Image (cartoon, rainbow, N blue to C red):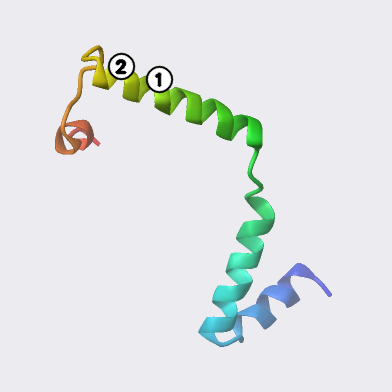
Amino acid sequence: MSTAEIIEQALHLKASERYVLLELLHQSLDKPDPEIDRVWQEEALRRLQAYDEGRLECVSMQEAFRDL
């Protein structure tokens, strides 16, 4: 069965079935990497500590996204 045929069949599924398929496909692509998670956790803790100690300047969410 070709990719086009699979897509065609998937598009005929009920919305709830398409959602389940979407979630399964997404999970198959989005594999967590423990090393990346560890590094980001350490970075988040460093930033929180810097904020708590007053060494990190903060801006509001509106200011941060103003120019986007």
38 over 6 or under it: above or below: above
Q: CA distance from mark 2 to mark 1?
A: 6 Å
- Residue at x-position 59% and y-position 82%: 17
Displayed quadrant of residue 22 = bottom right
- Residue at x-position 61% and y-position 86%: 12
47 over 64 or under it: above or below: above
- Residue at x-position 59% and y-position 74%: 20
Where, quadrant-wise, is the C terminus in this rendering?
top left
Q: Is residue 55 left or right of residue 38?
A: left
Query: Which label is found at residue 19?
Result: none
What is the residue that sits farthest to the right in this orientation? 1
- Residue 13: % across, % down: 61, 86
Crowding at dot 2, Cα within 10 Å, few <14 / some 14-19 / many 20+, comes out as few
Crowding at dot 1, Cα within 10 Å, few <14 / some 14-19 / many 20+, comes out as few
- From the viewer's side, name the closer residue of 8 and 41: 41
What type is the residue that disc 2 sits on? Answer: Ala
Q: Are marks 2 and 1 in contact (CB under 8 Å)?
A: yes
Where, quadrant-wise, is the N terminus in this rendering?
bottom right
Q: Secondary structure at mark 2?
A: helix
What type is the residue that disc 1 sits on? Answer: Arg
- From the viewer's side, name the closer residue of 66 and 58: 58
- Residue at x-position 45% and y-position 23%: 43
Q: Secondary structure at mark 1?
A: helix
Query: Which label is found at residue 50?
Result: 2
- Residue 5: % across, % down: 74, 77
- From the viewer's side, name the closer residue of 55 and 25: 55
Q: Is residue 12 left or right of residue 64?
A: right
Displayed quadrant of residue 2 = bottom right
Query: Which label is found at residue 46?
Result: 1
What is the residue that sits farthest to the top in this orientation? 55
Q: Is residue 50 left or right of residue 7?
A: left
- Residue 55: % across, % down: 25, 12
